[in-house]
Image: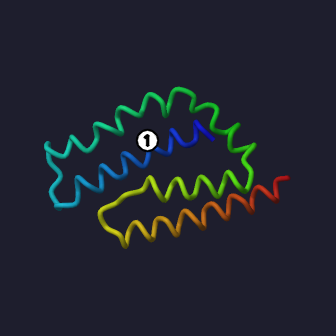
């Protein structure tokens, strides 16, 4: 699940940067610093992104549980209520993916 994690790292990095830049209610030029780290991870995220579907097709329930926990640790929004809702949504989404995977077999 290496490629999947690299893409998630990039995506959550951008989401966290947006959250930080909006925390004071006024996004500005000084908020650009929040985007530096996620932008530097873009190369790794997209280099072998074509392998992600293959990783997902081979994932086990353990891989899925590990990814969910990884997502929860990567997501770090300033507003805890929103972060909790997103984490609950991810749990539902991962359960749904597991259900669909069982049907597809």
Callout count:
1
Q: Which element carries disc 1, helix, strand or loop?
A: helix
Side of 78 relative to 93 (left or right): left
Where does the image place residue 64, in percent across and percent down from the top left? Answer: 66, 54
Task: Quadrant for residue 48, please give it.
Answer: top right
Q: Is residue 25 left or right of residue 6?
A: left
Placement of the N terminus among the 4 image quadrants: top right
Q: Is residue 73 left or right of residue 65?
A: left
Picture coordinates of residue 54 (x, y %)?
A: 70, 37
Rate crowding at label 1 as few (under 14), some (14 to 19) or many (20 or more) other CA atoms within 10 Å: many
Front residue of 78 and 53 = 78
Q: Residue furthest right?
A: 105
Seen at 22% across and 60% down, the residue is 23
Task: Locate residue 49, reporting x and y percent.
Answer: 57, 32
Question: Residue visible at 37% across and 73% down?
Answer: 81
Q: Position of residue 9 (x, y in %)?
A: 46, 44
Q: Is residue 102 above or below residue 2?
A: below
Q: Quadrant of residue 43?
A: top left
Q: Which residue is mark 1?
A: 10
């Amino acid at each position: 699940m290496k490629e999947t994690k690299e893409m998630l790292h990039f995506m959550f990095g951008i989401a966290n940067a947006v959250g930080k830049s909006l925390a004071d209610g006024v996004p500005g030029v000084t908020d650009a610093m929040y985007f530096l780290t996620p932008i530097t991870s873009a190369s790794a995220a997209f280099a072998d992104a074509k392998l992600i579907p293959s990783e997902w097709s081979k994932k086990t329930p353990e891989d899925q549980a590990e990814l969910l926990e990884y997502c929860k640790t990567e997501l770090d929004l300033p507003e805890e209520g929103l972060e909790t809702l997103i984490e609950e949504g991810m749990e539902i989404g991962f359960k749904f993916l597991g259900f669909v995977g069982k049907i597809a077999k």
